Image (cartoon, rainbow, N blue to C red):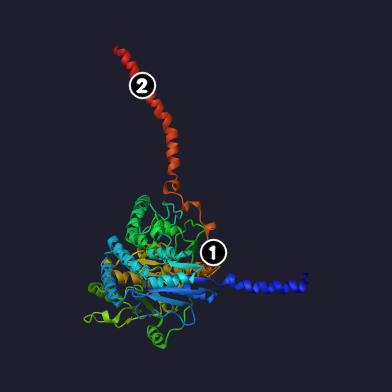
């Protein structure tokens, strides 16, 4: 049969229209097993993919520490949600434990054993989630094209392996967080996680960095030990013999909630993409009540205080006394996100201090009269400060926050005070320096220009990379062979051993022959 040119064009157009949905629409599972800022990020990612024409469902675990004044209700006319929880009794027990941990953080007690206890809770939750036959059967029936995981929680990777679905790992923190993805990290200028070093290291800094790099695999093994039994029980023969490292390296792509406006420059690999600033948006007008309160302070402006989505209150009395006394010494307004029910009845609130259960952080930081942001140093908070060019006072409490505020200080964005060091005098002098020294605002403006001027916005950047993975049936072309090499091959220790044998072998042979000859000569003299 012969076709005219017009018929050929029509056939081509019809074929194209039929194939476009296949190429552009995918079934995507997003996995959010931790609340707080982790949920905010996964919610934004899920919504962005839905808006881009994909069919998205979030697996959301309820009952983790919640954001005061915020409800996990999802968005209207957006992605679908499947919720799961361990029940009210466990949720009450777990949140009670987490509230006690807040106090320990504020007292400066951020021990590795506490982090392992946290991982133990996540492992317990993981065991029950994977054991929920109804939920697992439902997810397997859906046959997702790809899953986007919260890479902070190892359970996400075990779940993806159980479902047999390709997955993208989204890490909500900086580049030095995951230990197992084989990024080239020269220890002379790339700080190891929790080292609290900048990229400018002296001899002792490099020595500390080396020691932390040697300890990191041991810490990772302790973390994996909390999940090993769970993985073996639910994956059976498919349980990874290489542990956490093998699971992490199975991701098609790693996306990090950071960029080089805040991150120290370092080498990357093709399977890594930086998408920091997903929650950053132009500020919206504040409600009339807040705007009137800000106007009351005139050109002096105001300070925003929040210690993170999961730390709802400061439950250490002497620390509250010192902070309120420090804030009261300024003509600026201070708006502080604090669980009002936990404010001590014996402590008066200074006239310039306004306590709120919830605050529109992005809109406040984008207000022209904001002067300073007092933050715990969470990655989202710092990226929002960068976006809106607001200097920060970092009060790190746990996890990656210590490294985060070191980077912020090294970039000139702000200063750091440890919670155990806070006094009214130190707080007052530090705020005065940050609000009156123009260098901090100048650095903030410079970082904001860098962050805002990337050619592709972070949300679209992630979508494009995930679609690239989908269109090419995976990301194997992005992953180097180093991910499957044994550690001694990756570090060239086998070649070093070979060279040592080649160089030392002849020397050892010569030494043995010389010694034998001397021994023979000595025996002849004795005879």
**View extreme (front): residue:** 1
Q: Secondary structure at mark 2?
A: helix
Please give the residue where the numbered disc 1 appears in the rendered image: 469
Q: Quadrant of the N terminus?
A: bottom right
Whichever of labels 2 and 1 marks the residue nearer the N terminus, that label is 1
245 vs 405: above or below: above
Q: Nearer the viewer, residue 225 or 283?
A: 225
- Mark number displayed over residue 398: none
Q: Residues within 10 Å of mark 1 (few under 14, many from 20)?
A: many
The spot of residue 52 in percent (x, y) is: 54, 74
Residue 319's quadrant in the figure?
A: bottom left
> Is residue 420 in view from this perspective?
yes
Q: Secondary structure at mark 1?
A: helix
**View extreme (top): residue:** 527
> Is residue 385 in view from this perspective?
no
Please give the residue where the numbered disc 2 appears in the rendered image: 516
The spot of residue 169 in percent (x, y) is: 45, 64
Spatial separation of the CA atoms under disc 2 and disc 1: 65 Å
Left or right: 7, with 193 as reference point? right
**Closer mark to the observer between disc 2 and disc 1:** 1
274 vs 304: above or below: above
Q: Quadrant of the C terminus?
A: top left
Residue at point 34% right, 76% down? 66
Q: Residues within 10 Å of mark 2 (few under 14, many from 20)?
A: few
Left or right: 26, with 64 as reference point? right
Residue 107's quadrant in the figure?
A: bottom left
Residue 505's quadrant in the figure?
A: top left
């Amino acid at each position: 049969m012969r076709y005219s040119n017009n018929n050929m064009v029509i056939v081509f157009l019809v074929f194209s229209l039929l194939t476009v949905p296949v190429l552009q629409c995918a079934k995507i599972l997003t996995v959010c097993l931790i609340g707080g800022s982790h949920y905010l990020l996964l919610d934004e990612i899920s919504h962005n993919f839905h808006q881009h024409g994909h069919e998205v469902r979030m697996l959301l675990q309820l009952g983790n520490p919640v954001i005061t004044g915020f409800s996990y209700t999802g968005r209207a006319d957006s992605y679908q949600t499947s919720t799961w929880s361990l029940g009210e009794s466990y949720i009450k027990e777990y949140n009670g434990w987490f509230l006690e941990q807040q106090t320990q953080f504020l007292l400066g007690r951020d021990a590795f054993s506490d982090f392992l206890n946290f991982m133990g809770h996540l492992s317990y939750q993981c065991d029950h989630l994977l054991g929920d036959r109804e939920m697992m059967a439902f997810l397997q029936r859906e046959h997702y094209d790809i899953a986007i995981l919260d890479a902070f929680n190892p359970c996400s990777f075990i779940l993806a392996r159980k479902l047999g679905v390709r997955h993208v790992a989204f890490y909500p923190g900086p580049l030095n967080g995951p230990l197992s993805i084989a990024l080239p990290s020269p220890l002379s200028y790339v700080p190891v996680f929790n080292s609290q070093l900048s990229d400018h290291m002296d001899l002792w800094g490099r020595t500390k960095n080396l020691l932390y790099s040697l300890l990191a695999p041991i810490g990772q093994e302790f973390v994996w030990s909390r999940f090993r039994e769970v993985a073996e029980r639910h994956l059976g023969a498919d349980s990874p013999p290489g542990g956490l490292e093998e699971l992490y390296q199975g991701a098609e792509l790693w996306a990090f909630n950071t960029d080089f406006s805040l991150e120290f420059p370092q080498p990357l690999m093709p399977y890594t993409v930086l998408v920091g600033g997903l929650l950053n948006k132009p500020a919206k007008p504040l409600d009339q009540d807040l705007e009137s309160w800000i106007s009351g302070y005139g050109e002096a402006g105001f300070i925003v205080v929040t210690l993170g989505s999961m730390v709802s209150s400061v439950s250490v009395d002497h620390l509250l006394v010192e902070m309120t006394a420090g804030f009261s010494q300024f003509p600026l307004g201070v708006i502080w996100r604090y669980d009002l029910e936990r404010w001590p009845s014996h402590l008066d609130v200074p006239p310039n201090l306004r306590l709120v259960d919830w605050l529109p952080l992005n809109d406040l930081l984008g207000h022209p009269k904001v002067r300073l942001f007092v933050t715990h140093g969470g990655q989202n908070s710092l990226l929002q400060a960068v976006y809106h060019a607001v200097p920060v006072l970092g009060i790190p409490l746990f996890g990656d926050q210590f490294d985060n505020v070191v980077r912020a200080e090294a970039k000139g964005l702000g200063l750091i005070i440890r919670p155990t060091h806070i006094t009214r005098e130190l707080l007052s002098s530090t705020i005065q320096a940050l609000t009156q020294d123009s260098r901090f605002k100048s650095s903030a403006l410079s970082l904001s220009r860098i962050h805002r001027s990337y050619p592709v916005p972070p949300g679209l950047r992630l979508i494009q990379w995930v679609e690239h993975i989908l269109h090419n049936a995976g990301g194997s072309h992005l992953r180097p062979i180093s991910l499957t090499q044994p550690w001694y091959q990756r570090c060239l220790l086998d070649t070093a051993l070979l060279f040592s044998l080649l160089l030392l072998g002849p020397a050892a042979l010569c030494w043995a022959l010389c010694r034998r000859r001397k021994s023979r000569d000595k025996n002849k003299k004795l005879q």
